[in-house]
Image: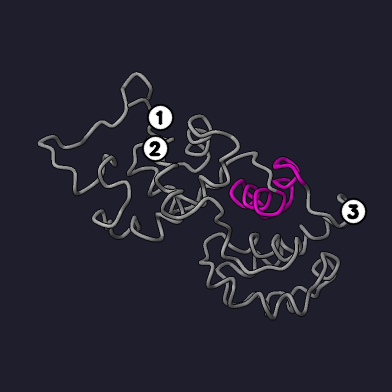
């Protein structure tokens, strides 16, 4: 099976299992809150972020509030988030840039978003997809890296290179869904610590499946010619 066809089968099965309308579990009510929650999310669980954002969002409502905040006060509100001191500094700087360069509005391109301090490709992709329904890339987190590696959809470990591989084999209109579906599988049954292949909808086609009965060490699902 060629890689693009295999990717389509993977997508359809995951969509059938987890749905086609998955969204971030980070709590937010508007674009400012979405930006801040996603901005704080790297190296953290959604639960960590959701634990601190209700109070944070009551205190800081606009980018002007973050830009003009006392840094020590902002750090205190972010305590409990990994790397909170660095994130507080970058959030203050990014908010100031949004105010001064973008009129207080979150930019709508990946290039502009990545000009903001503390914003990488993953954060930018999530903001664009969740906030604007724009697909300029695929957000690759640790769950995606694990799942993609086990499915042999990419031989790379670097998130940027994995993203480029995924963008080549999945339709652009589905890029946001691809990320959410891979994350859903990674959280559900294909965790980094343990595979639960007996509960996975891809168990019969995944080259890393414990349930595939084969005398070989690996099972080739798609042709060598296709990648």
Indicate whether 4 appears above or below 208: above
Residue 13: x %, y % from top left: 39, 45
Residue at numbered disc 2 = 9
View extreme (top): residue: 225
Specify whether 159 is left or right of 65.
Answer: left
Q: Which portion, as a residue range, is magenta? A: 108-132
Instruction: Give me the C-alpha separation between circle 3 and circle 1.
Output: 44 Å
Secondary structure character of the magenta stretch overall: helix
Label 3: state its secondary structure: loop
Within 10 Å of the Cα at label 3, are there few (<14), some (14-19), or many (20+) other Cα atoms?
A: few
**In-front residue for pair 120/22:** 22
Residue at x 63%, y 60% (from the top left corner) = 38
Split into 4 quadrants, where in the image is the N terminus?
Answer: top left
124 falls in the magenta region = yes
Specify whether 183 is left or right of 215.
Answer: right
Instruction: Give me the C-alpha separation between circle 2 and circle 3.
Output: 43 Å
Specify whether 134 is left or right of 11.
Answer: right
Indicate whether 23 appears above or below 69: above
Residue at numbered disc 3 = 103
71 falls in the magenta region = no
Count of marks overlaid on the render: 3
């Amino acid at each position: 099976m060629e890689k693009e066809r295999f990717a389509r089968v993977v997508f359809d099965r995951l969509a059938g299992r987890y749905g086609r309308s998955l969204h971030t579990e980070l709590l937010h009510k508007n674009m400012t809150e979405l930006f801040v929650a996603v901005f704080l999310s790297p190296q953290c669980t959604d639960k960590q972020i959701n634990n601190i954002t209700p109070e944070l969002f009551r205190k800081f409502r606009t980018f002007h509030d973050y830009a003009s905040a006392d840094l020590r006060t902002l750090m205190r509100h972010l305590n409990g988030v990994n790397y909170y001191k660095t994130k507080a500094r970058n959030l203050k700087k990014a908010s100031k840039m949004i105010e001064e360069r973008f009129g207080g509005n979150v930019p709508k391109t990946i290039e502009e978003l990545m000009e903001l301090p503390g914003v990488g490709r993953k954060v930018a992709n999530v903001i664009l997809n969740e906030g604007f329904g724009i697909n300029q890339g695929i957000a690759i987190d640790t769950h995606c890296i694990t799942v993609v590696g086990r499915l042999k959809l990419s031989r790379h470990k670097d998130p940027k290179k994995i993203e480029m591989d995924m963008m080549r084999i999945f339709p652009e209109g589905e890029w946001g869904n691809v990320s959410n579906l891979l994350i859903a599988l990674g959280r559900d049954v294909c965790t980094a610590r343990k595979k639960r292949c007996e509960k996975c909808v891809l168990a019969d086609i995944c080259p890393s499946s414990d349930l595939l009965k084969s005398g070989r060490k690996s099972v080739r699902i798609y042709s060598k010619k296709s990648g």
